[in-house]
Every structure is written in C-alpha cells, then in structure tokens.
Image (spheres, rainbow, N blue to C red):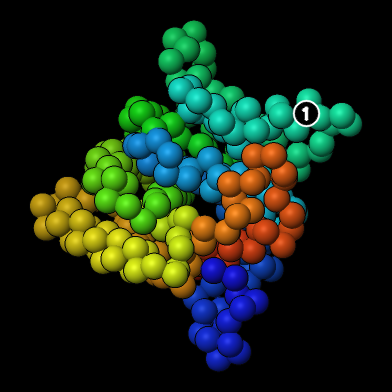
Amino acid sequence: MKTSTLPRQRLQEVTKLMMSRDETITAIRALGCLIIGVGMLKGGTGKTTSTIYLALYLAVVLGLRVCVVDTDDNSQTVDNWYKARERKNPPEDVPFDLVTYDPKDEDGPDFDDVLDELSELYDVILVDVGGAGKETYWELSKTAHMLLLPMAPSGYETTRMPATLKQASRGGKQNTNRFKVFVVLVKCDNRTTLPEEQQDALEGALEALEATQQLRVAVDLVGEDFNISGATHYPRSWDSTPKRADLEEYGVLFRYMMKSWAA
C-alpha cells in the first residue's frame, strides 16, 4: 500500500498502526540486532523480492547496517541478484552486505553460530529461507525476532502455510526472544476480489490450526491495508535496482510489523 495515495483521514488511521521512522530506528538500535526470517516452505511466493526490498528500505531509507543471509541452496536468488550488480560496468554499489550459507555443507559452521557472529556487526539480519529448508526454518525460529511469510493470493500458497507455521512453532518453543510471525499477501491486484477472498481463506486456515492447538507462536495476519501490490517495479527489480520511491510499500509494512511486534 502506498500511503501517499490515501485520503488524509485514512492516512491518519493507518499511521497509528505503524511506528514512525525515528521510533523504528531507535527500537532496532536499542535491541542490538534485529533478526528477521523471510520465506515459506514453498517456492515462488515472493520471499526473495520481499527480502531485497526490505533490505533496501532498511539500509537506504533508515540508514541501518543490514546483512542478508541467503540460505536457499536450491536457487540462491539473492546471491545471484547481488552478483549481477557486482558484474555491471561499472559495478553497482549494493547498500547491504550478503552472506551465502549452504545448510547442506556438513563441514560448514552451524547456522546459529553464523547468526551470533553477524549480530555483533549489523543492526538487522534478514534471512532468505529456501522453500525446502525445514531444518533452517527450525534453527531460525529458535533465534529470530520475526518471521515474514509472503504469499500470493492463491490457494497454492495457503495449503503450505500450516506446514510452515508448524515448523516455526517447533523452533519458536525454544526462542527466548519476543518472536512473532507475520503473514502478508503480496502480488495483489486490487482490481479483482482475489486478495479479499484469500484474506478470508487465510483467516480460516489460522483458526483451524489454533483449534488443533498446533500453533504455538504468535501470528499476525497482516490486514489488507498493508498488502503488497502487484506493481510492475517488483518483477522488474531483477534488472533494475529499485528506486527509493519504490520501497514505500515494504517500508510501511515493516513499520507496521515493528509496532505489532513491540506491542
């Protein structure tokens, strides 16, 4: 959602649900390091786009030290996006750092050790979790403060949400931080009723999980005001690095997440 398009009264209502930029920066720096996981146990849900846009917003707009950890050993799309900018002539400066982690490397460091080391160097760590990375999801959920599940308005994504949340619950039981999961619809075309229909379907799926007492983490089904649109600059961001103005929707979503998490 672009707040710049809202009527004044509606803008005031939505703004109350978000932290201000200054409050967000202060809260993150007071925390020391904010760790956010992004992804579903399914490919193609918009996790890499969400990771890149959040990283750019945090680094460019908020001026924070940001590191992205790409754990998707199947595609490592963030890694490829990052290297594509390094190969440009002249090379394009990316305002956040990248660490590529292979969860299948038996000789590599433990994932929690990697996060511990990076947390001493950065204000925010964003972890792009692969679609098949159950163990990484579990490890991340033991340490992270937030987990963002981006989902297109499609039943295909909804069917994978319970498995993802169960894995997050498994790790979240051991998490000593305040830990919250956010489910948000992306790629929304508001000229159709699909986003509204899928919002209802997600509510039903969450209620079913709660009824079986399998949901042991706090989950925030983000309201329609904070859905991410299907704007053309999202698919084009592989070739063209997003402009500052293009980061607004993810900035609004993030500031909402921060206020909900801190409440």
Q: Pick the residue in front: 86 or 22.
A: 86
> Does 43 appear above or below 150?
above
> Does 157 appear above or below 23?
above
Question: Position of 128 compared to 155: left or right?
Answer: right
Percent x, y for residue 145?
46, 49
The type of residue carrying mark 1 is: Glu
- Looking at the rendered image, the quarter that the N terminus falls into is bottom right
- Looking at the rendered image, the quarter that the C terminus falls into is bottom left
Residue drawn 40% across the image and 52% down it: 152
Question: Position of 249 compared to 102: left or right?
Answer: right
Residue drawn 24% across the image and 46% down it: 159
Mark 1 crowd level (few <14, some 14–19, many ≥20, 10 Å Cα): some
Residue drawn 43% across the image and 39% down it: 44
Percent x, y for residue 229?
51, 61
Q: Pick the residue in front: 87 or 226.
A: 87
Label 1 sits on residue: 86
> Can residue 109 be seen from the camera position used here?
yes
> Can residue 120 be seen from the camera position used here?
no
Query: Which corner quadrant of the image does residue 103 belong to?
Result: top left
Give the SS element for disc 1. Answer: helix
Percent x, y for residue 243?
74, 54
Percent x, y for residue 166?
24, 42
Residue drawn 51% across the image and 37% down it: 128
